[in-house]
Amino acid sequence: MNAVNIVLWGAGVALIVLGYLRARRPWARYQGLKDQQANVARYEAWRGGVRDSSTTGAEVMIAMVRREALTWAGVAGVGLVLVIAGFAIR
């Protein structure tokens, strides 16, 4: 074990923790908004109304929180790569 391994492990773990903590909240919001959209679609289908096909504010918000969650999940993925690189480098 040399200093490079320890630095890679430390940076990797830090990025994994940061990515997880920052992605958890938008992902939960994304799931809630998606469930709410499905509920609205079921209600309008039950009611027999024609649903407007234009983009709604909820759909824009769903895309925003999904993008944020995926960005932070990517940061955690980079952290995982750093941890693996720390083990691979001799």
Image (cartoon, helix red, strand yellow):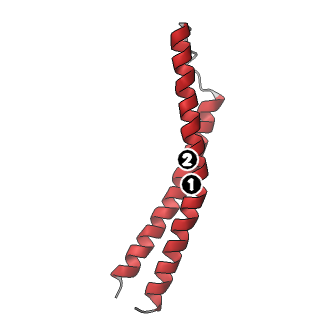
Are discs 2 and 1 less than 8 Å apart at CB?
yes
Residue located 65% across and 30% down the image: 57
Residue 89 rendering spot, x and y as whole percentages: 36, 84
**Amino acid bearing label 1:** Ala
Q: State the residue position of label 2.
A: 27
Residue 79 rendering spot, x and y as whole percentages: 48, 69
Residue located 51% across and 66% down the image: 16
Quadrant in the picture for the N terminus: bottom left
Residue lying at the far bottom in this picture: please name it: 2
Residue located 38% across and 74% down the image: 84
Labelled disc at residue 23: 1
In this rendering, the count of numbered labels is 2
Q: Nearer the viewer, residue 40 or 79?
A: 40
Residue 76 rendering spot, x and y as whole percentages: 50, 63
Q: Is residue 1 above or below residue 13?
A: below
**Amino acid bearing label 2:** Trp
Q: Nearer the viewer, residue 59 or 31?
A: 31
Distance Cα–Cα, label 2 vs label 1: 6 Å
Label 2 residue SS: helix
Q: Is residue 20 above or below residue 14?
A: above
**In the shown orientation, is residue 50 left or right of residue 5?**
right
Mark 2 neighbour density, 10 Å: few (under 14) some (14–19) many (20 or more): many
Q: Is residue 29 above or below residue 21?
A: above
Residue located 55% across and 47% down the image: 27
Image quarter of residue 61: top right
Mark 1 neighbour density, 10 Å: few (under 14) some (14–19) many (20 or more): many
